[in-house]
Amino acid sequence: MTDPIRDLLRTAGSAWLAARVLVGISAAIVGVLEAGDRGPYPWFDRGLLAWDGDWYRAIAENGYRPGEEEIRFFPLFPLLGRIVGIPAFDNASIGLVIVANVMALVASLMIGTLALRITGNADIAHRSIWLVSVWPASFVLVFAYSEALFLVLTAWAGLALRDRRWEHVAVAGFLATLTRPTGLAIAVLVVAVVLQDGRTSARERGRQGLALISPFLGFALFASVSAREHGAFLAPVDSQRVHRGEFVDPLRRLLRGVEDIVGDELFGDGLHLPFALVAIVGVVLLARYVGRPEAIYAGTIVLVAISADNWNSLERYTLNAYPMMIGFAALLTDLGRTVVWRVTLIASSAGLVGMSVLTWTGAYVP
């Protein structure tokens, strides 16, 4: 009898390697474009530290500097990058890349394990691993971005909730919110599970309460540092408005996305609309194949993402909803057609290459 976890680890390793080969192909394409006088591409020169990676590097090396917009980047990922990179390599950048890529492997394995726990179907579990690894926006799991760490922590919370290990959920929620502000959505997941369970003992309610407040405690810890250094408790959130704009009616924002894609923004902001619609479909699939609490959790993240006036980076924001790929994997397995799965995998891999190229050339803001 084969060990299912060992099989999942084998799949996770193969998918992890494939994603890095695809990003390498993207780098080769951008290199050819630059050599053909289409450049220069300053973001390409930053390698895996492009875009947000450069901010994380600055934080890892120098901490939070008063008055700088880097306060919008939460501290756990750059802290781990510093811990890994400085003692061993005297280089925080190397540490950030190592942490991101190791966490990417762990995240895919945990999501596959969770899929197996929920569905009992090995095909769904293995396909979940492939999807989370080669999803078009999953190039951020190769770059020095915090998404991989965030997925590990939220998937840990999801696994712990299956066994009602509330103390584990509390720790995972606390750390997730020190990684990304969307860690607060774990509180929504906890509420959904508690409501599903119904009445429990007083002791159990106390443990549930700890899991519920822990994401807010993580946020409050960083916000208190912000208040001391920047004079504003909500600076980490307020600083995002410069980039994402104010929150808007999500339905109106979707309609505006339609206008973009049929107008002159087809290869600009219009590119975000298909991913927004796919994310909404993903929430519906979660409700059908996985469970209502997971659908509510993912729906919260998707709603916040599509309610932003500026949809830049929407693709990786929705990737933060850790159960999403389980829903898509369940649908593809339910269809029972191998050719559909292979076409999906090829299309997704091509999308990953395309988005990596657009990111390094500066045509896409990740």
Image (cartoon, grey):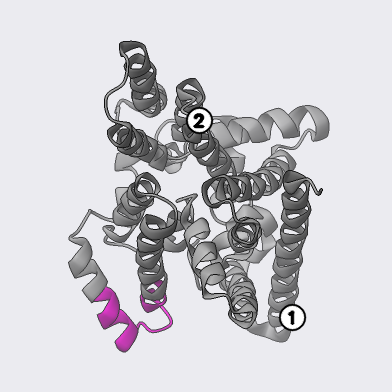
Membership of 258 in magenta stretch: yes
Instruction: Say which residue appears at 62% left-offset and 44% top-offset.
Output: 110
Mark whose residue sits in front, 2 or 1? 2
- Where does residue 206 sit, x and y in percent of width and height? 34, 14
User: In the image, residue 233 lies at what x, y percent?
Assistant: 30, 27
272 or 110: nearer the viewer: 110
Residue at 36% in and 39% down: 189
Q: Which mark is residue 152?
A: none
The main secondary structure of the magenta stretch is helix
Asked whether, in this view, residue 108 is left or right of residue 154, the answer is: right
Question: What residue is rendered at 75% in x and 49% in y?
Answer: 9
Residue 26 falls within the magenta-colored stretch: no
Quadrant housing residue 121: bottom right
> In the rendered structure, which amino acid carries the disc numbered 1?
Val
Measured in 3D between alpha carbons, the distance from the residue under mark 2 to the one under mark 1, in whole angstroms, is 51 Å
Residue in the foreground of this view, choosing between 77 and 57 = 77
Report the magenta residues as a range.
Answer: 256-272
**Earlier sequence position, callout 2 versus callout 1:** 1
Location of residue 213 with respect to 241 vertically, above or below: above
Residue identifier under label 1: 32
Of residues 182 and 152, the one drawn nearer to the viewer in this rendering: 152
Q: Is residue 345 visible?
A: yes
| Tag 2 residue | 163
Which amino acid type is shown beneath numbered disc 2? Asp
Q: Quadrant of residue 131?
A: bottom right
Q: Is residue 77 above or below residue 335?
A: above
Is disc 1 placed on a helix, strand or loop?
helix
Label 2 crowding class (10 Å Cα cut-off): few <14, some 14-19, many 20+?
few
Q: Position of residue 170 (x, y in %)?
A: 45, 24
